[in-house]
């Protein structure tokens, strides 16, 4: 299974901080989000005319920032047929509610769909991010000799490639090669923000006893470092099959923690509010008499 959830979360954080600030008026508030029906529904080409769809797996995680539950995510793996061919589709959906500079809470929905052939070769990826009344859709189509990056239906860049690359962390491939403390794997990941392939390193720290919602588990501790537009580091605890139970994602100015839990618990919404702008302010340990000068 190729893990793409953390990369979708990173993409959301990047867009949320890089794009111009949204207005904090009443229209920026979206209600009734505690339901799967409110997640973005993609209309990419591989979602049309499919048959024999089978869901292979589904997992839910709660997302936390500085101890406050800010949202949830869901990852699904499915198989289906189209035009006589068999495909695999990984879908990552997330919902988060945060504020900026003390304004009204803004809800952000992200949906990432990644399509592969039966051998695991990447074919297409699409990420939709909706913040308030604005929606951003980015795509990449993999052709025999190039990758075509799109914003909506507009072609942004055509990137030739020769070496293998992935849409996310190739956990299944890594596990097949064998896990052992100190072992590392280097690979390239497609970056929709920079329209390029970026370097990524996956390192095995070792096995650890860790508590997940009060349940003691013996899990593999991993670390992934990727050179996106904003460098990202992910520490993750996975089981023998590669399923993630906890992860800590750091971008240098923000840290989020994802914990695996039931669907019902993941969908529970916290009454507390998290201000993503104030949390990223660099605070001085010195007192200035005239800070405005």
Image: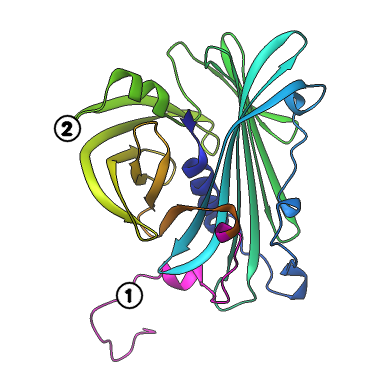
What span is colored magenta in the figure? 265-293
Q: Helix or strand or loop: what does disc 2 sit on?
A: loop
Q: Where does residue 222 sit, x and y in percent of width and height?
A: 29, 39
Quarter of the C terminus within the rendering: bottom left
**Disc on the earlier residue, 1 or 2:** 2
Up-down: is 85 above or below 111? above
Give coordinates of residue 275: x percent, y percent: 51, 72
Q: Residue at x 38, y 49 (%)?
A: 247
Disc 1 marks which residue? 283
Please report the residue visible at 42 percent of the width from the left and 13 percent of the height from the top.
163
**Residue 93 percent across, percent down from the top left:** 62, 45
Q: Main secondary structure of the magenta part?
A: loop
User: Left or right of 170: which side holds 109?
Assistant: right
Label 2: few (<14), some (14–19) or many (≥20) C-alpha neighbours in 10 Å: few
Residue that carries the numbered disc 2 in the rendered image: 182
Q: What is the spatial separation of the Cα atoms under label 1 and label 2, in whole angstroms?
A: 36 Å
Q: Residue furthest front?
A: 215
Residue at horizontal 71%, vertical 57%? 35
Which is nearer the eye, 263 or 166? 263
């Amino acid at each position: 299974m190729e893990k793409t959830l953390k990369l979708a979360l990173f993409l959301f954080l990047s867009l949320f901080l890089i794009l111009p600030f949204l207005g904090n008026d009443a229209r920026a508030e979206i209600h009734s989000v505690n339901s799967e029906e409110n997640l973005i529904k993609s209309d990419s080409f591989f979602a049309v005319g499919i048959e024999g769809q089978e869901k292979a797996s589904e997992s839910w995680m709660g997302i936390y920032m500085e101890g406050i539950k800010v949202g949830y995510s869901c990852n699904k793996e499915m198989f289906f047929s189209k035009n006589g061919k068999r495909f695999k589709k990984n879908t990552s959906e997330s919902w988060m509610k945060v504020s900026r500079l003390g304004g009204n809470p803004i809800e952000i929905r992200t949906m990432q769909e990644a399509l592969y052939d039966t051998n695991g070769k990447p074919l297409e990826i699409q990420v939709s991010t909706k913040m308030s009344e604005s929606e951003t859709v980015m795509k990449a189509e993999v052709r025999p000799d190039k990758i075509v990056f799109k914003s909506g239906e507009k072609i942004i860049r055509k990137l030739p490639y020769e070496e293998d690359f992935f849409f996310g962390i190739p956990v299944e491939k890594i596990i097949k090669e064998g896990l052992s403390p100190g072992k590392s794997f280097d690979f390239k990941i497609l970056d929709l923000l920079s329209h390029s392939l970026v370097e990524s390193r996956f390192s095995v720290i070792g096995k650890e006893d860790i508590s997940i919602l009060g349940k003691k588990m013996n899990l593999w501790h991993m670390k992934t470092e990727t050179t996106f537009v904003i460098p990202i580091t992910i520490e993750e605890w996975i089981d023998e099959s590669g399923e993630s139970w906890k992860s800590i994602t750091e971008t240098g100015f923000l840290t989020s923690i994802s914990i695996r839990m039931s669907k019902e618990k993941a969908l529970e919404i916290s009454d507390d509010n998290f201000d993503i702008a104030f949390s990223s302010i660099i605070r001085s340990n010195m007192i200035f008499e005239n800070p405005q000068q």
